[in-house]
């Protein structure tokens, strides 16, 4: 697993100090953050001194191990030990360590593939896992030099926004179909990987309902299907239907536009935790509580598999319903292997070792699988009046051996009561027969899943998809503890399969999680909110900030379908103003089309700089605003000024009525033209990639072109009426030679329903009589090309203005998506530039059950610009403000 760079850690600490600790040092979130800052700052101090010689020693030992494995694989052909240097600071050595880790991991994979049963090879793989662990264990034993300088400040603020009370209330009104009010709404400061909120709802008939909301993080640490919220929702439906004390799921918001992750509501179960993570190990927990856990675990494992047939058919592979425990774990391991090849993770010899060990040690078990909870322990149960009332947090659930839950809970039970007494009570309560020999395998399987989430969480930090300080604890606590657990339970097994040696490591993990989460009792968190002492939700109100897809130059976007490949993900270097090329018709342009359906406001804004024209550079502006008050248009082609070359690569409009600035990955458009003004920010929700074909006449028009979906927020003021903008949009950026005279006609449809679906469709009729059509869709960050695109434009009586249309994508995966584009109630936007008449129509976009916005653009230049049109059935071509812009 790659080590976090010092600058990365420092930026996270500063972010927490500024946004969490400084505003309020009394609330639970601030106290929890302080507990995280202590080890993080201590680690930074170590990197100034004692961590450097430690890293040198690890590299020397790793190089020796690397050469030994090479000699085992290649014999004399391996040659002498390769030269290396341990000169440099911590970051230099960490880079060298990362490269060495990848090389050792690659050799371990070779050993696994060709010598899977050779004891010598297996011993080398295990030594590689132990080598990876050695850095972390030694790190915990060394002490840092004092660090005297005060750290600076950081302006980074890339945390994803929380679900807001207003958004949730609007969702619930639509979901329930009647009036209601959310009277209380609180974010729980705990939980890793998922977010939890509490809400109290007052219905129109006076009924008061308490809900718990479970929500994905904007940058999930686990993307495996079994951990996604829609599957957890369906699982809870099946479990709660059996009468088991699990929360009953109620409302599912799957990939809902306007919020940064899927969420669902569930009934709130009365009761309290016997103690927090930390308190559960410090305080004495009586046997009666543990015995009730044994009873509920027995009840869980006794639920017939027939109750989950529909769930398995929906989410599992064909034949999974007939699995034995043995075939189920083989199936699951194949699934996890496939997962790590599809989803980017940091390289880890430990994970390679664990996969190798697990695949060689699947129990020969012909029993039918049972439902396993996966995280069944004292921190996930509620009690009231001494009785267990609910079992929480089902994200780790799966089907497998009952020993999986028992192996997980054994170290905890053993600290409070005799383990055999717990097992006997479990069996007496209807539990399964237990084979203690299977306990090490099932615990190691749990460690594998946890570690995969951990290395993904660390990767999210390192590539900038996450700015959450909690996840620094993967490196500083969770990873070493779970590695030690994994190595302990996969070592030579004790008689009876005992795994008590993992107990201390699990305690460390849980204590760190408790401190890291600020994990106070859930009821206390709710009470603090009611009393006005919990300020975790902030005071600034809702503000969209989409996931950042900015990435290092070697990052690639996933492409699905036939001929699967990857595409380069670019950063802001392609969004800002480019250095002009030598061609006379070279241009650089930025575009934003957007629509806020709730307020019925939107816009189309394009600024193009044409610096090389004879007689001097020019600016082309297409600026449209659509609102209930009317429709505004300003279009011009005027001289390019030095003042239009805005700082940091932004674009001016030639007259200061419009500008586009790029800051921290967001595209900020400012409009200032008398009665129409606004500030609209677009934040990407899809990867920043160029999907356009690089051949034919279309390349003469769009040599570099990025069309990226996003969300928009900000404000707009039209004729004295102000709107708080909260909608969807698509932006584009392009540069290179642009020859408007190469096209007879074209169609460009760009739309989005949020992260769940965005589309781009283009057709092109060139003057060489070629006709081409292409397009792609983006779903949850994955691009799928269309092998065939059919665009039908509905045309008004003037034979020029479009009235929306229909797009059919036949994807390379074999799927067929039909998108209907229906105009919003406002006239079309008509732009006439370089003898080409371009019509843009703002539309609502529907596909299946999804709804969003799109811009439907068409042009008809079959007469090659012999005249400028003047009359349109439902379009506006002249500048000005038109109060009656409703279509007829």
Image: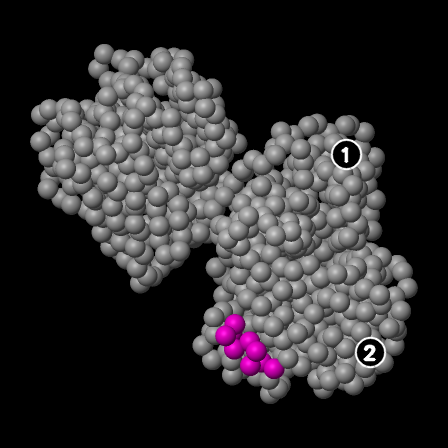
The foreground one among 118 and 603 is 603
Image coordinates for residue 179, horizontal then vertical, percent = 55, 48
Residue labelled with disc 1: 24
With 693 as the anchor, is 422 left or right in this view? right
In front: 779, or 548?
779
Report the quarter where the N terminus lies: bottom right
Quarter-of-image position of residue 844: top left
Q: Callout 2: helix, strand or loop?
A: helix
Residue at figure coordinates x 48%, y 74% from the top left: 313
Disc 2 to disc 1: CB gap under 8 Å: no
Compared to 568, does 565 lie above or below?
Answer: below
Residue drawn 27% across the image and 25% down it: 586
Q: Which residues are magenta?
A: 304-312
User: Badge 1, how many Cα within 10 Å: few under 14, some, many 20+?
Assistant: some
| Residue at the disc numbered 2 | 422
Q: Position of residue 170 (x, y in %)?
A: 54, 45
**Is 465 situated above or below 603?**
below
The residue lying toward the viewer, choosing from 581 and 267, is 267
- Label 2: how many Cα within 10 Å (few below 14, some 14–19, many 20+): many
């Amino acid at each position: 697993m790659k080590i976090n760079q010092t600058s990365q850690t420092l930026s996270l600490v500063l972010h927490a100090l500024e946004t969490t600790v400084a505003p309020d040092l009394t609330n639970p979130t601030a106290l929890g953050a302080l507990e995280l800052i202590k080890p993080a700052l201590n680690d930074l101090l170590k990197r100034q001194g004692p961590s450097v010689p430690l890293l040198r020693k690890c590299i020397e030992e790793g190089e020796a191990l690397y050469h030994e494995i090479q000699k085992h694989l290649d014999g004399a052909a391996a040659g002498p030990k390769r030269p290396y240097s341990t000169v440099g600071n911590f970051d230099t050595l960490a880079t060298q360590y990362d490269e060495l880790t990848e090389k050792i991991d690659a050799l371990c994979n070779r050993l696994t593939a060709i010598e899977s049963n050779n004891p010598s090879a297996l011993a080398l793989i295990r030594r590689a896992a132990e080598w990876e662990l050695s850095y972390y264990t030694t790190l915990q034993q060394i002490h840092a030099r004092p660090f005297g300088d005060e750290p600076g400040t950081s302006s980074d603020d890339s945390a994803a926004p929380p679900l807001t009370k207003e958004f949730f209330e609007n969702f619930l009104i639509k979901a329930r179909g009647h009036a209601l009010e959310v009277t209380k709404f609180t974010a729980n400061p705990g939980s890793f990987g998922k977010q939890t909120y509490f809400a109290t709802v007052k219905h129109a008939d006076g009924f008061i309902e308490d809900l718990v909301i479970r929500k994905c993080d904007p940058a999930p640490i686990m993307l495996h299907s079994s951990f996604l919220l829609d599957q957890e929702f369906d699982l809870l439906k099946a479990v709660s239907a059996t009468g088991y004390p699990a929360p009953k799921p109620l409302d599912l918001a799957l990939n809902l536009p306007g919020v940064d992750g899927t969420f669902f509501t569930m009934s709130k179960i009365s009761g309290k935790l016997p103690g927090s993570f930390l308190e559960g190990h410090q305080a004495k927990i009586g046997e009666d509580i543990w015995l009730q856990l044994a009873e509920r675990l027995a009840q869980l494992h006794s639920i017939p598999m027939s109750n989950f047939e529909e769930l398995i058919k929906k989410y599992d592979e064909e034949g999974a319903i007939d699995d034995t425990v043995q075939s189920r774990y083989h199936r699951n391991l194949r699934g996890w292997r496939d997962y790590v090849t599809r989803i980017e993770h940091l390289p880890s010899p430990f994970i390679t070792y664990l996969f190798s060990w697990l695949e060689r040690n699947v129990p020969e078990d012909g029993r039918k699988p049972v439902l396993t909870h996966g995280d069944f322990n004292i921190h996930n149960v509620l009690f009231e009046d001494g009785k267990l009332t609910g079992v929480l947090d089902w994200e780790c659930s799966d089907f497998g051996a009952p020993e999986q839950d028992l192996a997980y809970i054994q170290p905890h039970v053993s600290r409070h009561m005799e383990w055999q007494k717990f097992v006997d009570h479990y069996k007496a309560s209807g539990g399964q027969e237990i084979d203690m020999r299977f306990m090490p395998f099932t615990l190691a399987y749990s460690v594998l899943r946890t570690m995969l989430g951990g290395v993904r969480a660390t990767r999210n930090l390192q590539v900038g998809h996450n700015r959450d300080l909690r996840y620094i604890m993967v490196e500083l606590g969770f990873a070493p503890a779970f590695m030690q657990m994994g190595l302990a339970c996969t070592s030579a097994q004790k008689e009876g399969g005992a795994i008590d040696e993992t107990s201390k490591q699990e305690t460390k993990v849980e204590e760190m999680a408790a401190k890291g989460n600020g994990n106070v009792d859930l009821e206390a968190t709710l009470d603090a909110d009611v009393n006005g002492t919990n300020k975790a939700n902030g005071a600034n109100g809702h503000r969209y900030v989409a996931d950042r897809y900015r990435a290092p130059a070697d990052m690639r976007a996933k492409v699905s379908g036939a001929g699967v490949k990857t595409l380069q993900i670019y950063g802001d270097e392609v969004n800002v103003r480019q250095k002009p090329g030598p061609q006379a018709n070279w241009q650089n342009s930025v575009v934003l089309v957007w629509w806020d359906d709730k307020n019925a406001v939107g816009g189309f804004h394009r600024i193009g700089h044409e610096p090389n024209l004879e007689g001097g550079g020019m600016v082309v502006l297409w600026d449209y605003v659509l609102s209930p008050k009317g429709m505004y248009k300003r279009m011009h082609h005027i001289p390019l000024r030095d003042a239009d070359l805005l700082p940091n690569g932004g674009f001016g409009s030639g007259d200061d009525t419009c500008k586009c600035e790029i800051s921290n990955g967001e595209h900020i458009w400012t409009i200032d033209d008398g009665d129409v003004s606004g500030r609209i920010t677009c934040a990407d929700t899809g990867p920043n990639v160029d999907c356009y074909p690089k051949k034919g006449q279309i390349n003469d028009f769009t040599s570099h072109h990025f069309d990226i979906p996003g969300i928009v927020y900000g404000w707009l003021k039209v004729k004295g009426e102000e709107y708080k903008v909260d909608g969807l949009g698509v932006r584009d950026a392009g540069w290179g030679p642009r020859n408007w005279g190469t096209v007879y006609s074209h169609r460009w449809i760009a739309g989005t329903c949020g992260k769940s679906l965005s589309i781009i469709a283009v057709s092109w009729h060139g003057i060489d009589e070629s006709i081409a059509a292409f397009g792609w869709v983006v779903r949850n960050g994955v691009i799928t090309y269309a092998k065939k695109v059919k665009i039908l434009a509905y045309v008004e009586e003037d034979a020029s203005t479009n009235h929306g249309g229909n797009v059919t994508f036949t994807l390379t995966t074999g799927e067929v998506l039909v998108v209907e584009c229906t105009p919003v109630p406002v006239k079309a936007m008509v732009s006439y530039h370089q003898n080409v008449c371009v019509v843009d129509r703002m539309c609502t976009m529907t596909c299946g059950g999804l709804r969003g916005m799109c811009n439907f653009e068409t042009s008809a230049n079959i007469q090659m610009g012999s005249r400028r049109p003047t009359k349109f059935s439902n379009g506006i071509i002249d500048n000005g403000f038109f109060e009656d812009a409703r279509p007829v």
